[in-house]
Image (cartoon, coloured by chain):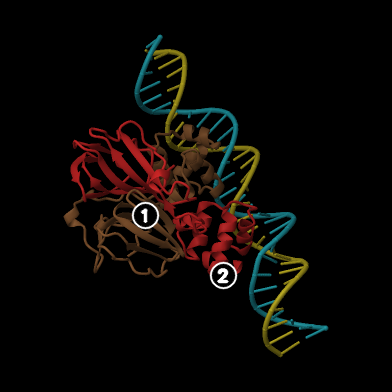
Chain colours: A red, B brown, C cyan, D yellow
Amino acid sequence: MDTGTRLKLVRERNKLSQRELARRSGLTNSTISQIEQNRVSPSVSSLKKLLEGIPMTLAEFFSFDEPPRQERFVFRAVEQPDLGSGGLRLLLVGASVEGRQMRMLRELYAPGADSGEEPIVHTEGEECGLVTRGTIELRVDGQVSILNSGDGYYFPTTLPHSFKNIGQDEAEIISANTPANF
Amino acid sequence: MDTGTRLKLVRERNKLSQRELARRSGLTNSTISQIEQNRVSPSVSSLKKLLEGIPMTLAEFFSFDEPPRQERFVFRAVEQPDLGSGGLRLLLVGASVEGRQMRMLRELYAPGADSGEEPIVHTEGEECGLVTRGTIELRVDGQVSILNSGDGYYFPTTLPHSFKNIGQDEAEIISANTPANF
DNA sequence: CTTAAGTGTCAAAAATAATGGGCGACGCAT
DNA sequence: ATGCGTCGCCCATTATTTTTGACACTTAAG
């Protein structure tokens, strides 16, 4: 969705006229008109001023979108695609959900299997999970922890992290992370 | 945090030089230099082009905060507070994490226990989960499904929904929802 | 009907952002 | 030391955005 349409939607939701929003933000009504028509692309500073009159943050503005439309709610075990390789299976729940905000995985580690060092490709985001079977060695930012069934974790994905099954049986983790990268 | 600093941080995290990012985004390195020094405020269209070269969305860019500072990553089973009542235990993972975006629960349903009809208080948000033990009857927006171990679900929290353990043994669900309400 | 205050839009001037070229500084190989 | 490639920054010109000051339209009141 383009910036102009988005602004118009936000403004109308708050029952503000272009002129009223102009007064509150310190810009002019003409500017707002042109932005909403996508005749110009506002500078970040201008947009920021506009949103202060709403009020709304830039983050909220850009993450604002239509409620997820979907017909399917249930994703059977056999329908979950495997994103892993080798001794590691990563089964994705809700693969077909359009525009989802989270990614939930059922992670199955063969004995000795590990996730490999994850490169820091993402500049934001959080990851959490819970061990349901087996014994996992978790490394986050240098810290090493041993997790057994029932233990959970929560960390920012900006930190280097890796998982390894140090038990003799298969280990299982249910994890969720946001945003739903790939 | 200002836009320039933010961009610089994001660019450097992805190990891109101003010129490399310029090449990828179609803008010039001079522009990037000036933006990062906050000598100019980029237009949304320019910023969008820049972020496409990262790649990153505008929403991600503006919701990017300094990495959540926290010392603890692991949350043991015994440390997880119980938010449920009656035959339902809701164990919260990462309770003490400041400003987290998700809420992960380990949900334990006694035979016959249910979650009750959840009122629609939230105008946005998503919920997903996976059944790890037992048999659950899930109702979402009138649709009824039976889920067994390994089956997952994903739906918008704007829809009415409820869970019930229809098996003879305890049932377990690992769920995550966003935003981390309450 | 007339007036006044409200709405969103438009065109030309003023202000701001983006480009293209050039600068000194750094690391690295010759 | 010299050259080479890259880094980020600076500046004058060009391109884009923002303001100014209109315009046409709608609504409600006199």
Q: Is residue A176 above or below residue B87?
A: above
The percent position of residue A66, horizontal first and vertical second, equals: 52, 58
Q: Chain of mark 2?
A: A
Q: Residue A16: give its label.
A: 2
Query: In which quarter of the view is residue A90 placed?
Result: top left
- The answer to whether residue A64 is seen in the rendering is yes
The percent position of residue D15, horizontal first and vertical second, equals: 64, 42
In three-dimensional space, the C-alpha distance between marks 1 and 2, rounded to whole angstroms, equals 47 Å
Who is closer to the viewer here, A49 or B92? Answer: B92
Same chain, labels 1 and 2 = no
Image point (32%, 47%), residue name: A175
Mark 2, other Cα within 10 Å: few <14 / some 14–19 / many ≥20: some
The percent position of residue B15, horizontal first and vertical second, equals: 39, 34
Q: Is residue A172 above or below residue B129?
A: above
A2 relative to B78 in the view: left or right: right
Q: Residue B147: give its label.
A: 1
Who is closer to the viewer here, B11 or C20? Answer: B11
Q: Is residue A132 above or below residue C9?
A: above
Q: Quadrant of the C terminus of chain B?
A: bottom left
Image point (23%, 32%), residue name: A112
- The answer to whether residue A27 is seen in the rendering is no
Image point (43%, 66%), residue name: B160
Who is closer to the viewer here, D10 or B129? Answer: B129
Query: In which quarter of the view is residue A89 placed?
Result: top left
Q: Residue furthest front?
A: B168
